[in-house]
């Protein structure tokens, strides 16, 4: 993979870098993805590059004010203590004109999904975007499983590199999955467990155990889930918090069993809370697992929006080797799927 860090800083001076990031956040209070891209922006700035920030937000079909990037860019500018010129329109002639008259050297385009062709990997949009800068930097690991114009097609038209966050994500996830220090333990929670079956098949030759959260019990009728549980390495909760046939958290015996397994691990991958952690009364299991993992000396990779937010809320992030910004992207990586955005940086 071509990394930004391997590019001589001299090659950045005076160049305009198109920086693809993932600022897809539901709430403006959720600033993890914003904070995660600051090092790359500061690095580019320090080396004298101009920056055009590119991101999508939500899944709009057309312009939707609620999904504008403007308020997110405002927060980013505040964090960087700098002005960011925001282009509210999607007309490239106008963008080019504004670019030449803009103040400072950081710019941001509106939500890429307001532009036609972003989600169909359109060449027209990719060429237009590429024509705005000299280099393309993908720092959006979290959306690199999407074959979108600003992730995939754009790399055909401009020299392209992986940014600092992308480098951290890819190296951390590779270390945990390719040749992990053993025993490797994988903890899978959250909803749609059936969709995570390919992670079990991909990592089964390397992992000692897969530990599941209470959600697996809610999906027990799903044939895919039943199939997962037939694998001897897969462990389902043995006791739980239950109400009217629905399972909300893992119970004390399961916690104690999982803790013992986690303590012996050398590599740990965790995606998805083991209970309904947004409800305090059902967050005991997730808290216990979070503590056991962060107290362990293993190499630890944790991700998925809810899980990452839980770790941040409990201020446990310092004890995590990689807190991934990826949701679906992390799952695809763990399942060993080829990610279009990563393939084109190789
Ligand atoms: C995410 O939040 O997982 C990414 O930004 C991808 O978003 P998408 O699922 O709408 O493509």
Image: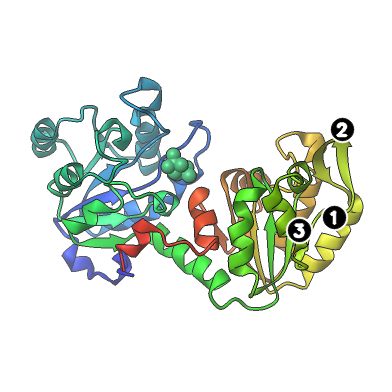
* Residue 44 x %, y %: 27, 56
* Residue 42 x %, y %: 33, 53
The residue indicated by pointer 1 is 255
Mark 2–mark 3 distance (CA, rounded to whole Å)? 22 Å
Sequence-wise first label, 1 or 2: 2
Residue furthest to the front: 223
SS category of the residue bearing label 2: strand
* Mark toward the viewer: 1 or 3: 3
Image-based side of 112 in relation to 16, left or right: right
SS category of the residue bearing label 3: helix
SS category of the residue bearing label 1: helix
Sequence-wise first label, 2 or 3: 3
Q: Which mark is residue 243?
A: 2
| Residue at 80% over, 67% down | 261
* Mark toward the viewer: 2 or 3: 3
Sequence-wise first label, 1 or 3: 3
Q: Which mark is residue 39?
A: none
Mark 1–mark 2 distance (CA, rounded to whole Å)? 19 Å
| Residue at 48% over, 31% down | 28
Which image quadrant: the C terminus?
Answer: bottom left
Q: Mark 3, residues whose alpha carbon is within 10 Å: few (<14), some, or many (≥20)?
A: some
């Amino acid at each position: 993979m071509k990394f930004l860090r391997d590019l001589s800083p001299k090659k950045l001076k005076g160049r305009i870098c198109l920086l693809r990031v993932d600022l897809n956040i539901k709430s403006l209070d959720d600033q993890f993805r914003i904070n995660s891209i600051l090092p790359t922006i500061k690095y580019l700035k320090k080396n004298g590059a101009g920056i055009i920030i590119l991101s999508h937000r939500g899944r709009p079909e057309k312009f939707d004010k609620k999904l504008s990037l403007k308020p997110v860019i405002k927060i980013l500018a505040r964090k960087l203590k700098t002005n960011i010129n925001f282009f509210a329109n999607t007309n490239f002639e106008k963008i080019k004109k504004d670019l030449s008259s803009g103040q400072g050297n950081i710019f941001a385009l509106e939500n890429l999904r307001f532009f036609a062709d972003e989600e169909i990997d359109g060449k027209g949009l990719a060429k237009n975007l590429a024509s705005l800068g000299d280099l393309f930097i993908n720092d959006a690991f979290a959306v690199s499983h999407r074959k979108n114009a600003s992730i995939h097609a754009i790399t055909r038209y401009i020299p392209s590199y992986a940014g600092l966050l992308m480098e951290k994500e890819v190296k951390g996830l590779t270390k945990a999955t390719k040749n992990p220090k053993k025993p490797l333990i994988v903890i899978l929670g959250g909803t749609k467990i059936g969709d995570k079956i390919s992670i079990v098949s991909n990592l089964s030759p390397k992992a000692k155990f897969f530990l599941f959260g209470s959600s697996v019990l809610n999906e027990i009728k799903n044939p895919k889930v039943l199939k997962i549980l037939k694998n001897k390495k897969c462990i389902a909760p043995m006791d739980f918090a239950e109400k009217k046939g629905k399972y909300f958290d893992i119970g004390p015996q399961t916690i104690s069993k999982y803790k013992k397994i986690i303590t012996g691990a050398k590599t740990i991958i965790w995606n998805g809370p083991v209970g309904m952690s947004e409800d305090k009364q059902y967050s005991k299991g997730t808290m216990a697992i979070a503590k056991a993992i962060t107290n362990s000396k293993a190499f630890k990779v944790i991700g998925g929006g809810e899980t990452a937010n839980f770790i941040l809320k409990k201020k446990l992030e310092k004890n995590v080797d990689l807190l991934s910004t990826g949701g679906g992207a992390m799952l695809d990586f763990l399942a060993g799927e080829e990610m279009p955005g990563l393939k084109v940086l190789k």
